[in-house]
Amino acid sequence: MDIILPLLAVVAVLLAIPGLRWIYKRVTLAVKLKACCKSKGFRLVGNRPLWMFGTSGGSVCDCYIETARTLYAVKLFSTPSKRSTLVFDDKGHYCFQKKIPLAGGYGGSIEYPKESRHRPMPAYDFRRGYRMEWEIKTPVRVLLINPVCREIRYASLQGGGRMLGAGDMVNNCRIYPLSRFLGELEAQR
């Protein structure tokens, strides 16, 4: 009985690590975005309190970043693990793939891809909380992947696919990891 309680505590901590990683990454995202906006003189407008904890399934964009000529409408999108692959398809769905290592012959290994169920991309509302003075600015819809995954892919249902990079379009949104989005903001005037 004396060993069960510490063992349960260790299991609870191990199960909590992904959630703690997600919270840490999102708080870090908010701090870095605010610092970048402050140094460049941009305005960061959250769409609700605690906007940095927005989820992939929410229907409203999480924040706006106003520059001199551009308005970035940012929707946060998270991935379950840094070893997963985020896959978008041409029907407006997404799923996550994990590679499960299996033992192979002669000391080699084989990776077996396991996919989550395909979920439809929500119809994100990038106009909620929009201000009239922003109408003259160039709008850019951003799907900000944070925490990031190993890779992001586009898979066509007719076969074939390609790797997606920062700035590529998915469902009328530009996808960025945080580091590349900060670089995009730094390049603005």
Image: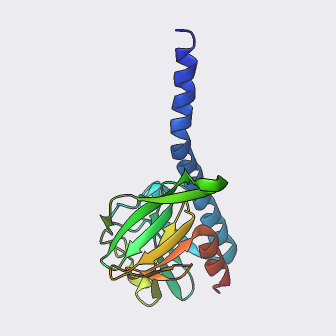
Closer-to-camera residue (153/146)? 153
Query: Where residue 116 appears, x then y in whole percent?
Result: 38, 58
Residue 77 higher or lower than 180, as above or below: above
Q: Does the rendering let one see residue 83?
A: no
Q: Which residue is painted at 50% across and 69% down in the image?
A: 144
Query: Where residue 140 appears, x then y in whole percent?
Result: 46, 83
Closer-to-camera residue (98/81)? 98
Residue 52 higher or lower than 66, as above or below: above
Q: Which residue is painted at 52% across and 16% down in the image?
A: 4
Q: Which residue is painted at 56% across and 62% down in the image?
A: 148
Instruction: Name the quadrant containing residue 151.
Output: bottom right
Instruction: Name the quadrant containing residue 40.
Output: bottom right
Classify residue 180 as left or right of residue 140: right
Most extreme residue toward the right is 39
Query: Where residue 143 appears, x then y in whole percent?
Result: 46, 72
Closer-to-camera residue (79/107)? 107
Most extreme residue toward the front is 106
Q: Does the rendering let one see residue 43?
A: yes
Most extreme residue toward the top is 1
Residue 12 higher or lower than 153, as above or below: above
Closer-to-camera residue (57/80)? 80
State the colouring used for the structure image: rainbow
Query: Where residue 102 appears, x then y in whole percent?
Result: 54, 52
- Which of the image's four quarters has the C terminus? bottom right
Classify residue 48 as left or right of residue 35: left
Marks counted in the figure total: 0
